[in-house]
Amino acid sequence: MNWIKHRLFRPRETWEKNLFVLWFSVFVTGMAFSEIMPFMSLYVDTLGQFTKGQLNLYAGLIFSVTYLVSAIVSPIWGKMADRYGRKPMILRASLGMALIIGAMGLVTNIWELFILRFIQGVFSGYVSNANALIATETPKEKSGMALGTLMAGLTGGNLLGPLLGGFLASTFSYRITFIITGILLLLVFIFSLLFVHERDFKPVAKKKLASAKGVIKVLKDPQMIFGMLLTTLIIQATNNSITPIISLYVRELMHHSGDVTLVSGIVAAVPGIATMLAAPKLGQLGDRIGTERILTIGFILAICFFIPTAFITNVWELGILRFLIGISDAAMIPQVQTLLAKNTPIEVTGRIFSWNQSFQNLGNVVGPLLGAVVSGFFDYSGVFIATALLVLLNLSLFRINVANKRH
């Protein structure tokens, strides 16, 4: 009992307090983003009289524009983070998101919504700067656990967001849901302002931030870093390649009968549950046996789980395999961030994590396009085979990158 009391109530170091606050903040941020996405296309439909083709086009543009803009501006914000600190960038992103998403509940036409989604991309960067702050403020031997914990918070928010968004939209309205989401992000801003502390920040000289060349020069192994950025893009693309077809695959497995919407929601949620549970533990294990080993295991597990998904015959098998995919995700995404943190000088960590965010956003755009194209040619099962091959390519590139680093 005394041991438990000591663990719970012992004085916390600054990095531990930051981790607790930022875990809650990225949880709410992930929830805020994901809760509006399930009904975004339905909201678009209320803003005008559109044909089916127009509705699909506009919904796709409004979905993707935020990620495209974010991919472009993330390096700029990363540069500012290394110059002025990660906390100011966290405050900028959270306040901007709160105002912009809240304003989406007040639009009167499709173009106003498109402009706000565009501006939302400009105010991106909360999660990447939270990762950078934790990576720089946390002792290196604890960084795997800390970044895994942060990833678990984000995943948990992404998991619960659609459930909360569906409840709010059905209880109130689409517009009120946007306003409530803005209020939640305003709370994130207030918590970050009051309780996040950046103690060890050392601003980088402005001359060194003039171009990306200055960042690359201070990297001990630029090839390894850029290899990890490419790994991030492919991981994100493989995860999102399933997004356009998962509910259609569920409907096919259920033979067009039963509550397809509910079952699809559950199937979509189970990878997040697995990732949330496994990420902190795998981060701790990576700190002990090596982050590279955990990442390699993650790739192998993903291949082993994606391939049989193409040959299943019922929705229960799909749910089980998607849960296992969530475990492989926990062995991949946080480990990439840990490797970036451990191999990047503190003075350019913000830039590197912003570049990683850009590659992640590009994966968010490439993945769904890949899934849509492959399913059009080879049916739904072909998407899982193609995704497994893409993971195999990612594993091969990563092992080559590691071998070159050791050499």
Image (cartoon, helix red, strand yellow):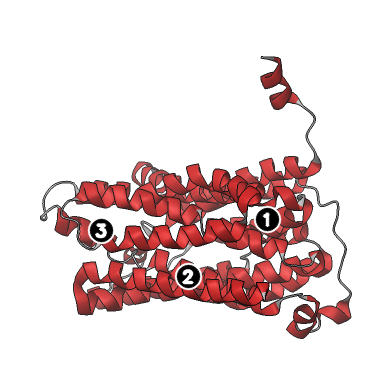
Identify the mark nearer the N-term, 3 or 2: 3
Label annotation for residue 130? 1
Q: Residue at x 67, y 65 (%)?
A: 340
Q: Earlier in the sequence, mark 1 or mark 2?
A: 1
Q: Amino acid at mark 1?
A: Ala
Query: Would you name the residue on which mark 2 appears?
Result: 395
Closer to the camera in the image, 343 or 133: 343
- How many tags in the picture? 3
Drawn side of residue 289 relative to residue 382, left or right: right
The residue tagged 3 is: 247
What amino acid is labelled 3 in the image? Ser
Query: Where, quadrant-wise, is the N terminus in this rendering?
Result: top right
**Residue found 67% across the figure and 72% down from its top:** 406
Residue 186 makes an appearance in the image: no
CB-based contact (under 8 Å), mark 1 and mark 2: no
Location of the C terminus (image quadrant): bottom right
